[in-house]
Image (cartoon, grey):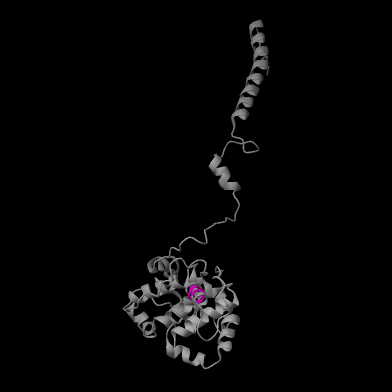
Amino acid sequence: MSEAPHGAPIKTPGQLIAAVIAGFAVPIVIIILLAYYVDNTTRTGAGTDELSTQQVAARIAPVAQVNVRDANAPRVYKTGEQVFQAVCSACHASGAAGAPKFGNSGDWAPRIAQGFDTLWKTALSGKGAMPPRGGTSPDDYSDYEIGLAVAYMANHAGANFQDPPKPAPGAANAANAASGAAIPQASTAPAAGGGSQSADASQAGKALYQQVCQACHAAGVLGAPKFGNKADWAPRLKDSMDTVYNYALHGKGQMPPKGGSTASDADVKAAVDYMVSAAK
């Protein structure tokens, strides 16, 4: 059986020239196209313009942020509803972890019967699964704002509580003083005594009371003797004034030394005299 003769694919000089040109031209074209593709591909290394200026700034921004506030600016307090929505609703909206459900009079009735002061104290100090202050700090919400939230929740379940007394205008976050927040010192006054005070000492005592002491003493929070309540102050006044001063200066029970302020000893004594005089 004979085999068919093999023929060369290039039979003419023109085909040879075309093959040679194609052998050089095709690789060159491929190289040019590859170079163009690489040059126009989005670069993700150094010098990339993939991210906008805002995206780059957000990516390299430090994790920690400093929020500078003017300590002398008037304090803008949140409402009871705002504090409830931000803090309390996590448990009280659904009654989670045994919390009395918002608006449920059956859940709240036993609590309302205890009185507002007891509920306020419980909210500040915590109870059961509820952490003190709902897990916030005095820098987040003052005692006054926590009290507003307590009144808001209780009143929506049948109570008729009054809002707690508002701290004096211009006072430096008085509600946080009992928790150790820094309070500007009142003007230094002469050492106060148990008797009559000088006008300067009286003013210094009143100023410190408004800045610091009223956070607890205005409503009798945390067992503090209520301002102007003779029955609350009578047991304390059985001791000597030096003993009462010592409690105020060095702390007792829930009250931190000097109410958590940095006031001078003389001003603290003046504040004690101011409260004592109101309870006589």
- The answer to whether residue 234 is seen in the rendering is yes
Image location of residue 151, percent across then percent down? 37, 75
Where is residue 44 shown, x and y percent of the image?
62, 38
Image-based side of 62 in relation to 106, left or right: right
Give coordinates of residue 16: x percent, y percent: 67, 9
Compared across the picture, whether 162 is left or right of 39 comes to left
**Residue 51 drawn above or below residue 17:** below
Query: Residue 164 at what x, y percent from top left?
Result: 40, 75
User: In terms of image quadrants, where is residue 255?
Assistant: bottom right
In magenta, the rendered stretch is 203-209
Q: Does the segment drawn in magenta span residue 208?
A: yes
At x 55% / y 78%, what residue is drawn? 268
Furthest toward the front, the residue is: 198
Image quadrant in which you'd find residue 167: bottom left
Q: Is residue 269 above or below residue 23?
A: below
Quadrant (top left/top right/bottom left/bottom right) for the N terminus: top right
Please tell me how many numbered marks the rendered image carries. Answer: 0
Between residues 99 and 23, which one lies in front from this camera angle?
Answer: 99
Does residue 7 appear in this view?
A: no
Is residue 171 positioned above or below 278 on the image?
A: above
Q: Quadrant of the C terminus?
A: bottom left
Q: Nearer the viewer, residue 252 or 47?
A: 252
In the rendered structure, does residue 271 fall within the stretch colored magenta? no
The residue positioned 57% from the left and 84% from the top of the image is 245
35 lies left or right of 229: right
| Up-down relation of residue 249 to residue 66 (above or below) | below
**Residue drawn 39% across and 69% down?**
80
